[in-house]
Image: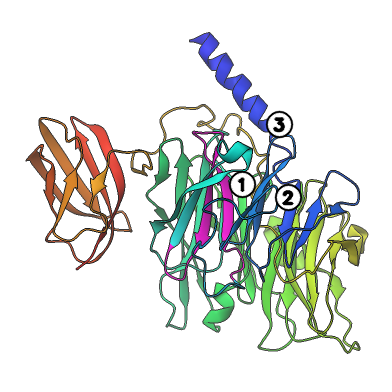
Amino acid sequence: MRSKFLFILLVLLHQQVFSQNRAINWAFGDSAGLNFTTEPPTPFLSSIVMYEPCASISDDTGNLLFYTNGKTIWNAAHEIMLNGNFLDIGVGTLSSCTQGVLIIPDPGDSNKYYVFHHDLNYLKYTIVDMSLEDGLGLVTSKNNIASDIPFTEKLQAVRHANGRDWWLLIESLKEVDVSSDLINFYSFLISPSGISLPSIHEGTILPDQETIYIFIGQMKFNQQGTMLACTNGRSVNLYNFDRCSGYLSHLYTIDSIFIGNNSDAIYGLEFSQLGAKLYITKAGEAGKGYIFQYTIDSISDIKATQQIIYIQDETGTNEKYLDQLQIALDGKIYIAMVDVLITTTHLCVINEPELTGMACNFDTLTIDAGNEIILGLPNMPNYNLGVMEKSGCDTIGTTAVNTINTNALQLYPNPAHNYIYLKQAPSGMVQIHIADIYGKEVLYFNQQSTDVINISTLQSGLYFITITQENAMLITQKLVVER
């Protein structure tokens, strides 16, 4: 037993030390790319084209594996990966869904990756296997439905406290047609067992404002994975995050940011490497953009720590917009600032994010990205985050029971109408559990094992079906019912 725990510890240490190059290559904008092995980063020509959603991932040694805009996946040769096209995301080829795509390594298979992407109505996922096609990768399954819960443009992930699994978070509005909107967060555990059913965490109530401003913007974890910041129109909400349970608790609302007119909105944000500072961009009409800095460790009155780092030149004739922020492996924070009249090929950068006020050393349009910047930067979680020591869940053990098991026994057909059939049904009595998308059990019964299950009482929609026998789970997967 002792040697087993020692082996697990060595594996986790290896993951923590050698995963540091996962985020070393960025592909974004219109054919732009950056490699962070040099100082400053070296530009390269990518094949990506997208207003905003984009994600990239490299291997442990810094070799580019693939990148995506949520519609297409390109391999390291900058060619479309086999079966890597026609992914579902938003509307049209040039979608402007802020964090519309995200790449998560499969905790159960070092060769496989989940690509999560935001459709109009669903959270979907696609699976990439890098062991195939001579290391260039192959999409083995695509456009799978993880959830049909309507959610905003915010999609983010953080490592579980055990250092192996991941928490995937989306933000959803419970009601969007009333004067006060209640935010709900849904967290999905990604483990070797698959993708869990979502857990619901109530956020905070937003003041009356146009719904469009609530939907847009960024949601980011600090590098320690203990705090979440989320833009919500004209404010930013901060939450404590429990890496063991995946639960959020509201901590603070920064609502002193509004400067300008009613068309302005908070758009981008990012934490400094140590988590002491939070940077926020306010996007508005031309010449009205701001970059704010807040000191997060002054939790009693964060609003009082506001520093204005940058104000766009209101005398200029070109329309420029401050957009997304992303921290890089060098600890600097990079910002997309787009000029709508001329092609922008350089990023802004905060060189010393831990320092207060103007000492943070903000430079405008100094980092050559090799090609055109649009609005987005790669949506990347902290791949380096490891085990949370003494957290109570810092050892590898049993993970979520209710999972979307991508390797389970087959139920068919799917979508189904009145009956589903179980291939290789076990003998004996089994229990059938069917839950809706919110995890509420809508159908349960015992039956002598058979290859036919009657679902004629279910309405059209997405469900999760679990079959157990003597308290052992035999199969869990999504089920689409069509009438």
Task: Check whether the beta carbons of the residues at disc 2 and disc 1 lie within 8 A of each other.
Answer: yes
Instruction: Look at the image and tell me in which quarter the C terminus lies.
Output: bottom left
Which comes before the other along the chain, label 2 or label 1? 1
Q: Residue 292: which quarter of the image?
A: bottom right
Residue 113, magenta (yes or no): yes
Query: Left or right: where does residue 368 sit relative to residue 327?
Result: right
In this rendering, the answer to whether 453 lies above or below 345 is above
* Boundaries of the magenta span: 97-122
Q: CA distance from mark 2 to mark 1?
A: 9 Å
Going by the picture, which residue comes out furthest to the left? 448
Which comes before the other along the chain, label 2 or label 3? 3
Q: Report which residue position mark 3 lands on.
A: 18
Element on which disc 1 rests: loop
- Residue 25 visible in image: yes
In this rendering, the answer to whether 213 lies above or below 218 is below
Q: Nearer the viewer, residue 77 or 451?
A: 77
Look at 17% across and 47% down and name the residue there. 421
Q: Amino acid at mark 3?
A: Phe
Q: Report which residue position mark 1 lands on.
A: 226
Q: Nearer the viewer, residue 447 or 420?
A: 420
